[in-house]
């Protein structure tokens, strides 16, 4: 299996699909829809094949492809996946299918819309497999282009400022990150992530940075913090981390729901993936030196995100802020894990638990958030575009199946035991509490607030008297139930047997844990 370029094929397939959809879809919108689903299903099948053939006992990279690209600049076409990368490939494939399902009723420029979704998927695959910075950065930036046009062309009334804000914010973060990596290249003469991590862990990166740059006569330690800040900013905007989050609510609210699903289900994970793949292995000492501010950012992301969600009345804005809140738990796990643990075996075990929970939460949040936004799209379509909580009420009477299935997704987001959201949050809190007790304790406030606004949504939308204008509100059709059932089943499956995913992550977690040294 290792001899065949599976990762290149996986990345190329949606690109080919986008071209086919544009050409064949010019004659038929129906053909564009089904062709896009066909290529997305093909990508999911390849991801499942990779999952089946993955060696769970290996913590390093598998399915490696490496070829010289621009040798003079040490730029290589370098691909590979470990457990983290594999889980993100599978998540991207699933979320893309959910996005296509939620976008099925798009009527304007259908071939272009579905082709752009496939291009986003290709960029996600590229970003989650590339191991050379320039190669990876190419996909990181290319992903913005189709996402921008999806928001700009098919978004809501304020789509233009929302799309512009999305592009400007993420580009600003990317520029800061690019400058930091150029500085590291001048110091280490490589763009390879693994080589940079090895140099940093050996203690040679900071002296090399100081020798290659006399900028403002900074000490090596201070120069390291400046370079770290640039890389951190690029990832913090993408997640987003509060206070770099202000682009997200408008973008999620104005984007067509299928695009919002891609943004929250997969693209936000690019930032967290960058934290785990790049920031922790290369900049763990710098993260340790500013650990308290980082933990305060995690607390703010969790607590303020949930408070902001509770204050909203628009369903898309509620779950936009809820997404910030849930990704804050991942930040807590990552930042707590870089705390110095010395040789204390118990604390090292807790670090592994926090990182396992973080990776599991990335996958679980992607599935749950994407499914919830799909339900929001269904509510919006059936109600003629209504999204305010006051627009609904009593829908359980006419749509009991919709109420039940959406309720499961909402309880998954709440963290109900037995569903996928519980175990990942439990692992994060279990691991983070001994490592960063005060921050973990404060983050539990977010759990309580999340329960409040989730239950409020359930009550306001499905309970109480049925409004007269919704007297003919339709329940989910048999076809819709069949399409939504796999996502709901996955919430139960990962909630009851999380080892299905954790078994593929354990070796990667142990390897990452061992790289965090001071």
Image (tube, rainbow, N blue to C red):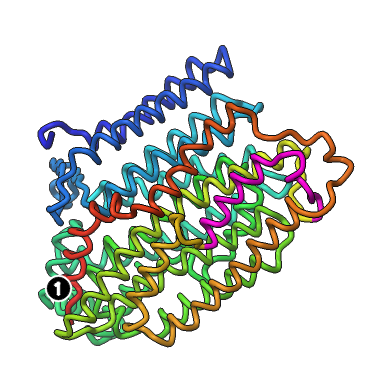
Q: Main secondary structure of the magenta part?
A: helix
At which x and y percent is residue 306?
59, 69
Classed neighbour count for the residue bearing mark 1: other residues with Cα under 10 Å, few (<14), some (14–19), many (≥20): some
The residue sitting at the right extreme is 468
Q: Position of residue 287 (x, y in %)?
A: 31, 78
Identify which residue is drawn at 36% across, 84% down: 436
The image shows residue 454, relative to residue 299, as above or below, that is above
Residue at coordinates 36% horizontally, 71% vertically from top-left? 333
Location of residue 101 in the rendering, given as x and y in whole percent from the top left corner:
54, 33
Left or right of 467? Residue 118 is left
Which quadrant is home to the N terminus? top left
**Residue 415 in the image: above or below residue 11:** below
Q: Which residue is mark 1?
A: 201
Q: Position of residue 423 (x, y in %)?
A: 39, 62
Relative vertical location of residue 1 with respect to residue 233 in this rendering, above or below: above
For the C terminus, the image quarter is: bottom left
Give 414 or 264, whichever is nearer the viewer: 414
Name the residue: 14% across, 84% down.
343
> Residue at coordinates 31% horizontally, 36% vertically from top-left?
11
The residue segment tinted magenta is 390-414
What secondary structure is found at the residue carrying circle 1?
Answer: helix
Frontmost residue, 71 versus 258? 258
Task: Examine the structure image and report whether residue 458 is included in the region drawn in magenta.
Answer: no
- Residue found farthest to the top: 27
Picture mark count: 1
């Amino acid at each position: 299996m290792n001899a065949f370029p599976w990762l290149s094929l996986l990345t190329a397939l949606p690109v080919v699909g986008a071209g086919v959809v544009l050409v064949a879809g010019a004659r038929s919108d129906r053909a564009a829809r089904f062709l896009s689903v066909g290529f997305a299903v093909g990508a999911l099948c390849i991801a499942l094949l990779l999952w089946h053939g993955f060696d769970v006992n290996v913590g390093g990279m598998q399915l490696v492809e490496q070829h010289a690209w621009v040798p003079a600049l040490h730029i290589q076409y370098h691909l590979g996946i470990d457990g983290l990368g594999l889980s993100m490939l599978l998540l991207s494939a699933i979320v893309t299918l959910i996005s296509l399902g939620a976008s099925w009723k798009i009527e304007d420029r259908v071939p272009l819309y579905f082709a752009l979704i496939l291009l986003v998927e290709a960029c996600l695959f590229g970003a989650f497999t590339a191991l050379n910075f320039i190669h990876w950065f190419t996909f990181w930036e290319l992903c913005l282009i189709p996402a921008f046009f999806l928001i700009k062309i098919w978004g809501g009334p304020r789509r233009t400022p929302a799309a512009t804000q999305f592009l400007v914010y993420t580009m600003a973060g990317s520029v800061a990150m690019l400058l930091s990596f150029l500085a590291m290249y001048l110091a280490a003469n490589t763009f390879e992530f693994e080589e940079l991590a090895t140099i940093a862990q050996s203690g040679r990166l900071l002296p090399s940075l100081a020798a290659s740059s006399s900028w403002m006569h900074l000490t090596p330690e201070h120069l390291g913090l400046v370079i770290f800040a640039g890389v951190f900013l690029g990832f913090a905007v993408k997640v987003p981390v509060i206070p770099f989050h202000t682009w997200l609510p408008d973008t999620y609210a104005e984007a067509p729901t299928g695009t919002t699903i891609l943004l929250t289900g997969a693209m936000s994970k690019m930032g967290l993936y960058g934290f785990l793949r790049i920031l922790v292995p290369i900049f763990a000492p710098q993260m340790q030196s500013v650990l308290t501010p980082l933990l305060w950012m995690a607390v703010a992301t969790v607590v303020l995100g949930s408070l902001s969600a509770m204050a909203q009345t628009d369903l898309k804005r509620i779950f936009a802020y809820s997404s910030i809140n849930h990704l804050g738990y991942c930040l807590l796990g990552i930042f707590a894990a870089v705390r110095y643990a010395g040789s204390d075996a118990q604390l090292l075990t807790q670090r592994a638990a926090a990182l396992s929970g973080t990776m599991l939460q990335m996958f679980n949040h992607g599935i749950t958030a994407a499914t919830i936004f799909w339900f929001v799209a269904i509510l919006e379509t059936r109600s003629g575009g209504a999204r305010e909580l006051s627009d609904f009420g009593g829908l359980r009477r006419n749509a009991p199946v919709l109420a039940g299935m959406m309720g499961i997704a909402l309880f998954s987001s709440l963290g109900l035991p037995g569903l996928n959201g519980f175990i990942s949050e439990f692992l994060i809190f279990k691991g983070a509490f001994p490592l960063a007790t005060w921050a973990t304790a404060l983050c539990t406030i977010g759990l309580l607030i999340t329960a409040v606004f989730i239950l409020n949504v359930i009550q306001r939308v499905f309970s109480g008297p049925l409004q007269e204008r919704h007297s003919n509100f339709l329940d989910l059709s048999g076809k819709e139930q069949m399409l939504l059932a796999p996502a709901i089943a996955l919430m139960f499956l990962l909630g009851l047997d999380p080892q299905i995913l954790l078994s593929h992550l354990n070796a990667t977690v142990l390897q990452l844990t061992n790289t965090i040294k001071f």
